[in-house]
Amino acid sequence: MGSTYETLLVAADFDATVDALRHAGVTAVVVPLADERVAVVPKEGDWDTAPVRSIGANLSLRLGCPTLAMCVFDSDLVRCYVIRDGETVHTYISDAEMLVEAFEDEDGQFHPMIDNVVYPVDFKIPAGPIGDDPAAFAPFAAGPPDLDAVGAALRDEGVAPYMMAEVQHWAIIEALGLPPEALTTAYRHCDPADFPAAVVLD
């Protein structure tokens, strides 16, 4: 069975992030990564999933900062959502073909639908990622972003033909200049003792 987890990267002060999460009643392990870069590992609910997008939307409003909700599914897929002012402003999907569904419109035409976004009938499904624009991730870097390194990680460049999703996710976080450990683990597998500066909210 592959690795599945959801985590959140917050571009805000650590203490302010902890206070906002506590006020919202979120159960999570909160880890400082760098100056105004915070990892949030929220507790899972049904089906071992965590509501990282709604938590990220709430924090983006409360703290006035961007958040990055990240999901790895079954070692096969990475999804990232850049959130500002409570809204998703950029979506990254590591392999679009894995999420293609059919959507029938009022005229009986079938459109490809990817991650709940409906595309034109003649939309050519890309082989590989959607949203692999490194500039969208720049606000989350520690220090000046290395856009070439971030772009290479988003596109799986310079690696073996198949990379497990959690390995690619690790590479994306490293390219942002951040320690990946807290952002690449599930709450159910997280040992706060591994992160001495962490705050546990329950």
Image: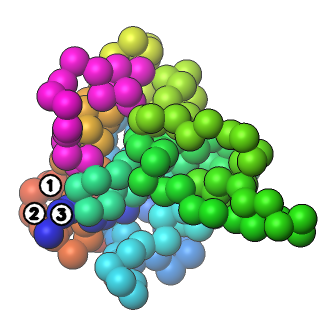
* Quarter of the rendering containing residue 174: top left
As drawn, is 183 to the left or to the right of 192? Answer: right
- Please state if 47 lies on the left or on the right of 92 as rendered: left
Other residues around mark 1 within 10 Å, as few (<14) / some (14–19) / many (≥20)? few
Q: Nearer the viewer, residue 95 or 22?
A: 95
Look at the image and give the residue range highlighted in magenta.
151-167
The nearer-to-camera label among 1 and 3 is: 3
Residue 142 seen in the figure: no
**Which of the 4 quarters of the picture holds residue 144?**
top left
Q: Which mark is residue 2?
A: 3
Residue denoted by label 2: 193
Residue 196 tag number: 1
Q: Name the N-terminal-most of marks 3 and 2.
A: 3
Judge whether residue 164 is colored magenta: yes
Q: Amino acid at mark 1?
A: Pro
- For the residues bearing labels 1 and 2, Cβ distance under 8 angstroms: yes
Look at the numbered disc 3 and give the secondary structure of its residue. loop
Q: Quadrant of residue 65?
A: top right
State whether residue 114 is above or below residue 142.
below
